[in-house]
Amino acid sequence: MKTLLGLVFALAAVGGCATAPAPVLSSLQVNAFNATVRQAEAAGASEGSTEAATLLREAKSDFYYAQHLPADPRRARDVAVKAQLNATRALEVAQANARHRLALRSDVSVTETTKQ
């Protein structure tokens, strides 16, 4: 009886593992998204209420949502692609803003130098 009960529990454990849903998003997608987010944050995308910050917030929210949609893998992948595009756009906007700020500082310092 103990052996039969042990066998039932063992089969249930193995069956439970076999029926666990596979991750919808690949580790490559997750790593690429996280790297883009880190780059966007380093470029200043998470600061303030700029377009970059809004895009980055939406990207993070969408990606989180995509990771929790195992019942609809195709929708999860579509949402993840949208999140990646938003994160990439946030990075581009943050980099453009940083270049613009740098150019403004350069103009100000040149103007101040010529006034003296």
Image (cartoon, grey):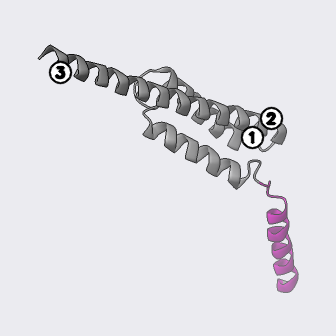
SS at mark 3 in the image: helix
- Identify the residue shown where x is 54% and y is 40%: 37
Q: Position of residue 3 (x, y in %)?
A: 85, 85
- Name the amino acid, label 2: Arg
Q: How crowded is mark 3: few (under 14 residues within 10 Å), some or many (20 or more)?
A: few
Q: Which residue bears the numbered disc 3?
A: 113
Q: How crowded is mark 2: few (under 14 residues within 10 Å), some or many (20 or more)?
A: some
- Identify the residue shown where x is 48% and y is 31%: 95
Give the mark nearer the N terminus: 1 vs 3.
Answer: 1
Label total for image: 3
**Frontmost residue, 67 versus 95:** 95
103 relative to 28, above or below: above
Q: Magenta stretch? A: 2-22
For the residues bearing labels 2 and 1, Cβ distance under 8 angstroms: yes
Q: Which mark is residue 75?
A: 2
SS at mark 2 in the image: helix
- Name the amino acid, label 1: Leu
Q: Which residue bears the numbered disc 1?
A: 69
Give the mark nearer the N terminus: 3 vs 2.
Answer: 2
Label 1, label 3: how far apart the Cα atoms are: 58 Å
Label 3, label 2: how far apart the Cα atoms are: 57 Å
